[in-house]
Image (cartoon, helix red, strand yellow):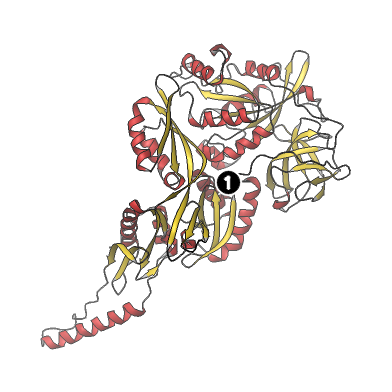
Amino acid sequence: MSPRALKPLAPAATPPEQIRNFCIIAHIDHGKSTLADRMLQITGVVSDRDMRAQYLDRMDIERERGITIKSQAVRMPWAGGDQTYALNMIDTPGHVDFTYEVSRSLAACEGAILLVDAAQGIEAQTLANLYLALENDLHIIPVLNKIDLPAADPDKFAAELAGLIGGSPDDVLRVSGKTGVGVEELLDRIVRDIPAPVGDPDAPARAMIFDSVYDSYRGVVTYVRMVDGNLEPRERIQMMSTRAIHELLEIGVSSPEPVPTKGLGVGEVGYLITGVKDVRLSKVGDTVTTARKPATDALPGYTDPKPMVFSGIYPIDGSDYGELREALDKLKLSDASLQYEPETSVALGFGFRAGFLGLLHLEIITERLSREFGLDLITTAPSVTYEVTTDTGETVTVTNPSEYPDGRVAEVSEPVVKVGILLPKEYVGTVMELCQGRRGTLLGMDYLSEDRVELRYNMPLGEIVFDFFDHLKSRTQGYASLDYEPAGSQTADLVKVDILLQGEAVDAFSSIVHRDKAYAYGVMMTERLRKLIPRQQFEVPIQAAIGARIIARENIRAIRKDVLAKCYGGDITRKRKLLEKQKEGKKRMKMVGRVEVPQEAFIAALSGDVEGKEKK
């Protein structure tokens, strides 16, 4: 603890001029959470005895993977001159899939620390977060982290950072989140440079909800940033979008554990507890005001996140459907971007069609559902939203291949994203080849420094949601970084590939792909299913088809019972009679028999996990 750290501030409203609201933004794995840990220690809000690495990462999954998924707000005291300041810090995620968390944090702050790894330099998400912060008119403090690493080159990257945001390399602070070097100077810089919050203390209360979580004992805990007026305990508050009125049971600040206070004033960041259990009554981005003296204008909320990737989520045990719905409701509260609606599948039963911001988001949500709620789930292959126009002029929005209209299709429109890739110059050729193979159109190429290049492409979203990031990392030995944002839509030659088992389409395996890649998808799926589906008493054809045209086929050979085993010698006509009888039986069985696809085969085929599962 620094000698300038003080005891937590008294539980009363702090004057706005003594408040500094800031967040930390950076690319994934550049040390945001470690720097936040040192700040908590130096300011004394967490004792050395209670300290643990990545203190603000509350979920097990965050700690295991070393990534931040949820933003966390914390209040810290710091002495500057003869004043004691309240620093409200919000630690944000770094992965492209969680940009919506960052956008909410930025809306609640006046300043941002732009953190860059001194060994890796500027990466794609660094640029994306910087542009977000500049759009919000935030004061930027450039900081180089990990200067204690042997591979660090602070002078080179300080010049790169200064060239990016303007200014001198000497203005770039150099810190080590691990050892604590330079962190006190950073806290002083925050107090000196970041402007105090501005608001009218006498106006009707207005507070913006930037986050909320569900507590099984206390109900919904809502995190707010006060803009105008003030809120006090036992006051009746109103949500401006839903007009719902609640009583404030508790109001306080996170330091970093909840500390009840006598109220929140202009510029303060804190939490509200109303005892409400319904997760839909506390919308992130909504404005809170008082029921006694309500405000007339709501605060401009941040833009609603639009799902980019869709996938079906089904319980393996159909009786878990109700539990899955409750679990999704609770997750929706702590994850405003999760969208879902019920759907049914012939093969998988009742489930939900859910929208995600990307593949990591999908992976995290399904893992949280299985860990926190004990559910066993199947997720279908990810897909994106298509607009299909039929010959009759009707337009259908397709988020699931089973919704693809039958009959003649005039055109199909697919979503396009603008992709930014940062990479060392020696990998430019191999990455351009990868992007062109995924139907990318080059928009431009910029050298950020002598050896770092930014490539900008327009690419169909459907081409990058599945395994593009894995291929990009393997082709650049892990050095490339990726960021993308929506860029409208384009028409393309897309077709629906159906997988038929014995002539019947299995909706869970259908996919919408580009015509050039339809054959490869058909061959891959038929081969995969041949290995996974158990052999039957009769031969089973597995076919891939576009409409009525078969493009690939595999056969599962029949299990043949040896009906001649009891014939020791004897006339050939007797043997022939038995074989003919078996042949007739197989023919009849093939006409009436149904192929049951086991649950394990569904899971393995949809996840691509077929190693060692081939049936003998």
Across and down, in percent, residue 5 comes to 71, 20
Q: Residues within 10 Å of mark 1 (few under 14, many from 20)?
A: some
Quadrant in which residue 51 is drawn: top right
Left or right placement of residue 551 versus residue 250 in this view? left
Q: Is residue 509 above or below residue 335?
A: below
Where is residue 407? Give x, y as percent.
Answer: 43, 66
Residue closest to the eye, 36 or 264: 264
Q: Position of residue 161 (x, y in %)?
A: 52, 19
User: Which residue: 52% across, 64% down?
Assistant: 317
> Which quadrant, please, contains the N terminus?
top right
Question: Label 1 sits on what residue type?
Answer: Lys
Residue in the image at 78% along x and 17% along y:
83
Q: Is residue 215 above or below residue 231?
A: below
Above or below, 401 against 153 in this view is below
Residue at the limit of the structure toward the right, as seen here: 292
Coordinates of residue 197 in the picture (x, y in percent) = 75, 26
Query: Which residue carries the number 1 mark?
Result: 306
Residue 382 visible to the viewer: no
Above or below, 466 against 173 in this view is below
Q: Quadrant of the C terminus?
A: bottom left
Quick one: 231 or 297, which is closer to the camera?
Answer: 297
For residue 190, which quarter of the picture?
A: top right
Secondary element type, mark 1: loop
Question: Residue placed at 41% from the left, 44% from the top?
Answer: 467
- How many numbered circles does the render carry? 1
